[in-house]
Amino acid sequence: MWFVTPPGVYPPQEDTWLLEAALRRERLPPGARVLDVGTGTGALALAAARQGAGQVTAVDISVRAVLTARVNGLLARRRIRAVRGDLLGPVAGQRFDLVLANPPYVPTPATGRPPRAADRPRDAGEDGRSVLDPLCARVPALLEPAGVLLIVHSALSGVARTLALLADGGLEARITDRRFVPLGPVVRARADWLRSRGLLAPGQDKEELVVIRARRTP
């Protein structure tokens, strides 16, 4: 499917498609309520709508991304509700049958300055977890009994920590999908720094993406 993707909005790419493949395997309950966190173009929110979700909410901190998701929803003739806000703030107190998340996860050298708007979709602090950690801590409270979280991120950001945080939140979490992809331009530009931190091996030219499925027990 073609998406409007203006500058500064995270475009659908390998991690998007890996998460969408995991989404397609989910059996959504009738009238399912779905949340897409960090929606970007709205690609995953629209995939959930095509799969029969009864209500889809898409959240992004970027005004440009929210407007883009709305436009793509209109072009696809699918109803999604796209709202601006920081992480899960706009949906506090609500419950969902499925939460999709493709958060920023690229380890980023400290600069002492807030990230530029154009870098927010990827840059995630020195350990790559500035968004992953609060997301893992807060998502369990948003899930219905038997609700599911599907989250994608790079192995550079610590898969074991994600699994542990989700388990601490009372979720049954496991890796369902893995894919090795060539290092993108941002990671290549940081390769020496990543190697100095032991996150990239000498000569490593690919990174592993994983999808984690976490289910709240009924």
Image (cartoon, rainbow, N blue to C red):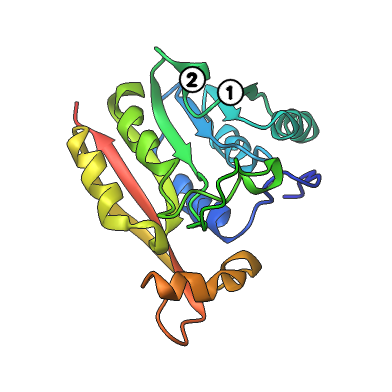
Q: Secondary structure at mark 2?
A: helix
Residue that appears at 39% across and 35% down: 135
Residue that appears at 60% across and 43% down: 113
- According to the picture, the residue beneath numbered tag 1 turns out to be 85
Residue that appears at 37% across and 34% down: 134
Please provide percent x and percent y for residue 46. Answer: 63, 36
Q: Nearer the viewer, residue 138 or 152?
A: 138
Question: Is 96 placed above or below 22 here?
Answer: above
Q: Nearer the viewer, residue 61 or 54?
A: 61
Report, in whole angstroms, how far the alpha carbon at label 1 lies from the one at label 2. 6 Å
Q: Could you say which quadrant of the image residue 93 lies in?
A: top left
Residue that appears at 19% across and 31% down: 217
Spot the residue most to the bottom.
Answer: 203
Please provide percent x and percent y for residue 85. Answer: 58, 23
Please provide percent x and percent y for residue 122. Answer: 57, 51
- Does residue 164 appear left or right of residue 179 in this picture? left
Q: Amino acid at mark 1?
A: Gly
- Classify 10 Å Cα crowding around label 1: few (below 14), some (14-19), many (20 and above): some
Q: Secondary structure at mark 1?
A: loop
Question: Which mark is drawn over residue 89?
Answer: 2
Q: Amino acid at mark 2?
A: Gly
Please provide percent x and percent y for residue 57. Answer: 56, 24
